[in-house]
């Protein structure tokens, strides 16, 4: 498809060629494994009200919680949770520096 002589429009095919899709299977696998360890750590009751939704480039784990009460209770146990997670994910080659609990993200996920 040729570009019109006097137009500032870009061709769709040129735009698509320039897109760089950043989806990485390893990131999704890490997130799935982190969720698995999270469920093991907190058990069935709490895992029904919380889930891992993100692991950032800065090694911060974000956990969505069903409400502020769950987020607050988990926050009080954050240091223990952090130690357990890091102990169990050593084979993944990552270290969690911090855990953020976010009850506002629950409905989005």
Image: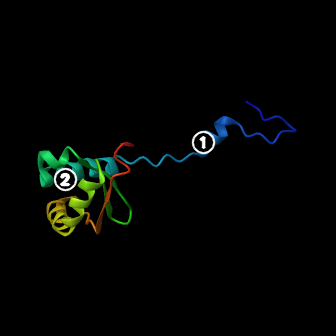
Give the residue displayed 19% in from the left and 53% down from the top.
38
- Camera-side residue: 36 or 19? 36
Residue 17 falls left or right of residue 7? left
> Mark 2 and 1 residues: CB-CB less than 8 Å, in contact?
no
Quadrant of the image occupied by residue 10: top right
- On the image, numbered disc 1 is attached to which residue? 17
Residue 82 versus residue 18 in the image, above or below: below
- Work out whether mark 2 precedes mark 1 in sequence or the reverse, and give the earlier one: 1
Q: How many marks?
A: 2
Query: For the view shown, which residue lies furthest in the front direction?
Result: 69
Give the residue displayed 20% in from the left and 43% down from the top.
48
Q: Residues within 10 Å of mark 2 (few under 14, many from 20)?
A: many
Residue 96 versus residue 109 in the image, above or below: below
Query: For the view shown, which residue lies furthest in the right direction?
Result: 6
Image quarter (top left, top right, bottom left or bottom right) of the N terminus:
top right
The label number, if any, that marks residue 65 in the structure image: none
Q: Residue 33 location in percent, x, y? A: 22, 50
| Display coloring | rainbow
Look at discs 2 and 1 and give the one toward the viewer.
Answer: 2
- On the image, numbered disc 2 is attached to which residue? 38
Q: Residue 17 location in percent, x, y? A: 60, 42
Q: CA distance from mark 2 to mark 1?
A: 39 Å
Q: Residue 19 location in percent, x, y? A: 57, 45
Residue 63 falls left or right of residue 48? right
**Helix, strand or loop at disc 1?**
helix
Give the residue displayed 38% in from the left and 51% down from the top.
104
Q: Residues within 10 Å of mark 1 (few under 14, many from 20)?
A: few
Give the residue displayed 38% in from the left and 62% down from the top.
57
Quadrant of the image occupied by residue 69: bottom left
**Helix, strand or loop at disc 2?**
helix
Q: Residue 52 location in percent, x, y? A: 28, 51
Image quarter (top left, top right, bottom left or bottom right) of the C terminus:
top left
């Amino acid at each position: 498809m040729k570009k019109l002589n006097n137009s500032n429009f870009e061709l769709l095919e040129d735009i698509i060629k320039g897109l760089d899709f950043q989806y990485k299977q390893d990131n999704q696998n890490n997130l799935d494994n982190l969720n698995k360890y999270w469920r093991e750590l907190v058990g069935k009751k709490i895992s029904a009200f919380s889930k891992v939704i993100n692991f950032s480039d800065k090694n911060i784990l974000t956990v969505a919680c069903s409400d502020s009460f769950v987020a607050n209770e988990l926050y009080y146990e954050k240091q223990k949770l952090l130690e357990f997670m890091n102990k169990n994910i050593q084979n993944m080659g990552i270290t969690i520096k911090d855990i953020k609990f976010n009850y506002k993200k629950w409905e989005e996920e």
